[in-house]
Amino acid sequence: MTQDVSLVTYDVLNLNRKLKLNVTGVNQPFYDMGRAAAMLLMNALNGKDHFAVQGQICPAEIHNGTTTTEVK
């Protein structure tokens, strides 16, 4: 019995550029995510936010490379 293995990762454009591959993965705006997290933390420390649940939605982009196969 043969089993296929797929490789999927984060920060795929950076990985593909450095290793000259075509890996499947998700790209996220890491700088923007860190900035949003820091602002939420600073607001919480300064008593500006009083929400039980806080969040930030950052866009993600999927890159379909050659490291996955379609399930049939």
Image (tube, helix red, strand yellow):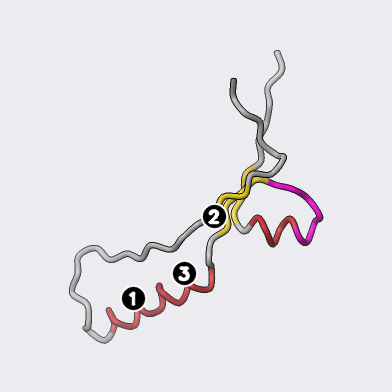
User: Dot 2 lies on which element?
Assistant: strand
**Marks 3,2: beta carbons within 8 A:** no
Residue at the image point whose x is 62% and y is 44% from the top: 8
Are there few (<14), some (14-19), or many (20+) residues within 10 Å of tag 3? some
Nearer the camera: disc 3 or disc 2: 2
Whichever of labels 2 and 1 marks the residue nearer the N terminus, that label is: 1
Q: Is residue 40 left or right of residue 18?
A: left
Amino acid under disc 2: Glu
The mark found on residue 61 in the picture is: 2
The one nearer the camera, 14 or 52, is 14
Disc 3 from disc 1: Cα separation: 11 Å
Describe residue 12's horizontal placement relative to residue 41 as left or right. right
Label 3 belongs to which residue? 33
In depth, the one of 71 and 45 nearer the eye is: 71
Element type at mark 1: helix
Residue type, numbered disc 3 = Met
Q: Give the spatial CA distance, label 2 vs label 1.
A: 24 Å
Using a 10 Å C-alpha cutoff, classify the residue at mark 2 as few (fewer than 14 neighbours), some (14 to 19) or many (20 or more).
few
Residues drawn in magenta: 17-23
Quadrant hosting residue 19? bottom right
Q: Earlier in the sequence, mark 3 or mark 2?
A: 3
